[in-house]
Image: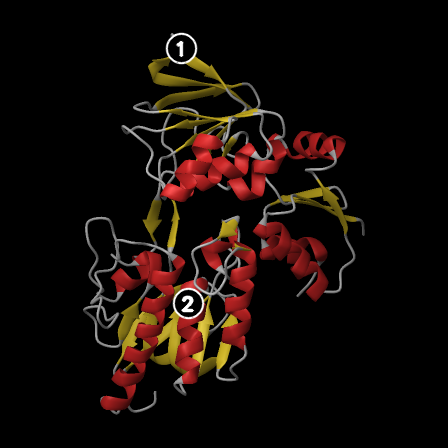
């Protein structure tokens, strides 16, 4: 399972999402959309919006921290 | 459903709820803090986590909103009598001397309740504002501001929060227009000075946005007054900081009185509401000066009043 999270350094929901991954021992790749312009463009094109965090779990996109959606996508109880 | 008993349940896990929990536990009360963190709800720590820098909390000259939230959470958690859980309260009912609290995960009983539910952002209501939400119309400058590096952005509002948001945006954007409906924006003087000194920020007073236009994303705003001879202004984003709406619906359900704005009417000496055993603190109340420090103080008072209510009235455990 490939998990990416697009973030900005100051966003509280991004922090929360990363904490959620860590608590559930899930490996993820963080992409800082502020310092990486190409990544920011990619995130906007994929999600069609300009808000963070954007989480990509095997091509499935989740915008914002939503524990229920994340659990479902990650098949967690 | 698991049913657990507590002395005090605090609804809301923002800075105010966490401070109330710390005091409540110190007073020997078994305390549960319920804070939703789902969808657009804020993480534990609440609205202060969306503030860049806090410089007006005694004892800390300068730290980020997230840092102070973490400190408050750790302080509350340092007491064994405190439990903090991320659950959304769906219903509260009075049952004899107690209250039954239902969440998305469990059910609880408690002798007293403290509402520290805070507020939510007031949405801008003009044509295009909904259509372009998160497509240039954004509500969290701290979260999404960095995505607008070298862009032209606008910010609607005139409060201290709005000014702070404009300063955050100016760190990334090449130009920030503050659009304010009144005569003059009214932040704290220290932030007004910072705004005046910042060459990227321009204030357009006595003006409203009447429409937001774009293609996939925001491209321009229409103003009700001309700016440099034109009512159209090219911007890449509209950040909104036009105030908050009190989250008092749950309190109203059990008979708590609110004012016209929906804010809980509080006895500011005791943090009591009109309903026995129900207390409140922070931004959800009718406290005029809404700051973390004033909310925290009311939260501590609410915890003490809850303690007095339980001990003086010899409330029998549920």
Task: Determine the residue positioned at 21% across, 61% down.
Answer: B265
Query: In the shown orientation, is residue A11 left or right of residue B106?
Result: right
Seen in the picture, residue B143 relative to B131 is either above or below; the reply is below
Please name which of the two marks, 1 or 2, marks the residue nearer to the observer: 1
In this orientation, does residue B187 appear?
A: yes
Query: In the shown orientation, is residue B224 left or right of residue B13?
Result: left
Label 1 close to label 2 by CB (< 8 Å):
no
Depth check: give the residue in front, B80 or B67. B67
Subunit of label 2: B
Q: Earlier in the sequence, mark 1 or mark 2?
A: 2
For label 1, the crowd category at 10 Å Cα-Cα, with few meaning under 14, some 14 to 19 and many 20 or more, is few
Measured from the top left, where is residue A29 in percent x and y? Answer: 78, 49
Measured from the top left, where is residue B293 in percent x and y? Answer: 38, 62
Displayed quadrant of residue B66: bottom right
Seen in the picture, residue B110 relative to B181 is either above or below; the reply is below
Task: Determine the residue positioned at 54% across, 32% down.
Answer: B170
Mark 1: secondary structure: loop
Mark 2: secondary structure: helix
Are discs 1 and 2 both within one chain?
Answer: yes
Q: CA distance from mark 1 to mark 2?
A: 47 Å
Measured from the top left, where is residue B289 in percent x and y? Answer: 29, 54
The residue beneath circle 1 is: B228
For label 2, the crowd category at 10 Å Cα-Cα, with few meaning under 14, some 14 to 19 and many 20 or more, is many
The numbered dot on residue B17 is 2
In this orientation, does residue B2 appear?
A: no
Depth check: give the residue in front, B140 or B152. B152
Q: Please, which colouring scheme is shown?
A: secondary structure
Depth check: give the residue in front, A71 or B137. B137
Quarter of the rendering occupied by the C terminus of chain A: bottom right
């Amino acid at each position: 399972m490939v998990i990416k999270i697009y973030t900005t350094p100051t966003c509280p929901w991004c922090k929360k999402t990363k904490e959620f991954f860590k608590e559930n021992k899930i490996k993820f790749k963080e992409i800082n959309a502020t310092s990486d312009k190409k990544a920011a463009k990619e995130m906007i094109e994929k999600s069609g919006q300009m808000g963070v965090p954007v989480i990509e779990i095997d091509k499935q996109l989740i915008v914002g921290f939503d524990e229920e959606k994340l659990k479902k996508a990650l098949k967690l109880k | 459903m698991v049913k657990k008993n507590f002395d005090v349940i605090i609804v809301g896990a923002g800075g105010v709820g966490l401070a109330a929990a710390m005091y409540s536990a110190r007073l020997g009360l078994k305390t549960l803090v319920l804070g939703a963190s789902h969808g657009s709800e804020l993480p534990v720590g609440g609205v202060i986590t969306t503030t860049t820098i806090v410089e007006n909390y005694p004892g800390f000259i300068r730290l980020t909103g997230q840092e102070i939230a973490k400190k408050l959470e750790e302080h509350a958690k340092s007491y064994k009598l405190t439990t903090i859980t991320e659950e959304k309260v769906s219903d509260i009912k009075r049952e004899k001397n107690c209250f039954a609290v239902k969440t998305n995960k469990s059910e609880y009983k408690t002798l007293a309740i403290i509402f520290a539910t805070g507020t939510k952002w007031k949405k801008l209501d003009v044509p295009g504002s909904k259509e372009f939400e998160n497509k240039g119309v954004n509500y969290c400058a701290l979260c999404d501001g960095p995505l607008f590096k070298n862009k032209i952005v606008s910010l609607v509002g005139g409060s201290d929060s709005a000014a702070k948001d404009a300063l955050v945006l100016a760190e990334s954007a090449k130009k920030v227009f503050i659009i304010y409906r009144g005569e003059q924006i009214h932040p704290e003087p220290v932030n007004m000075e910072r705004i005046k000194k910042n060459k990227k920020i321009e204030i357009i007073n006595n003006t409203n946005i009447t429409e937001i236009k774009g293609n996939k994303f925001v491209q321009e705003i229409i103003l009700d007054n001309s700016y440099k001879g034109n009512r159209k202004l090219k911007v890449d984003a509209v950040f909104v900081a036009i105030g908050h709406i009190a989250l008092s619906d749950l309190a109203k359900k059990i008979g708590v009185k609110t004012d016209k704005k929906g804010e809980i009417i509080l006895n500011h000496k005791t943090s009591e509401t009109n309903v026995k055993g129900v207390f409140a603190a922070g931004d959800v109340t009718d406290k005029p000066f809404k700051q973390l420090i004033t909310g925290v103080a009311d939260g501590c008072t609410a915890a003490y009043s809850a303690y007095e209510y339980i001990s003086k009235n010899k409330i029998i455990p549920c």
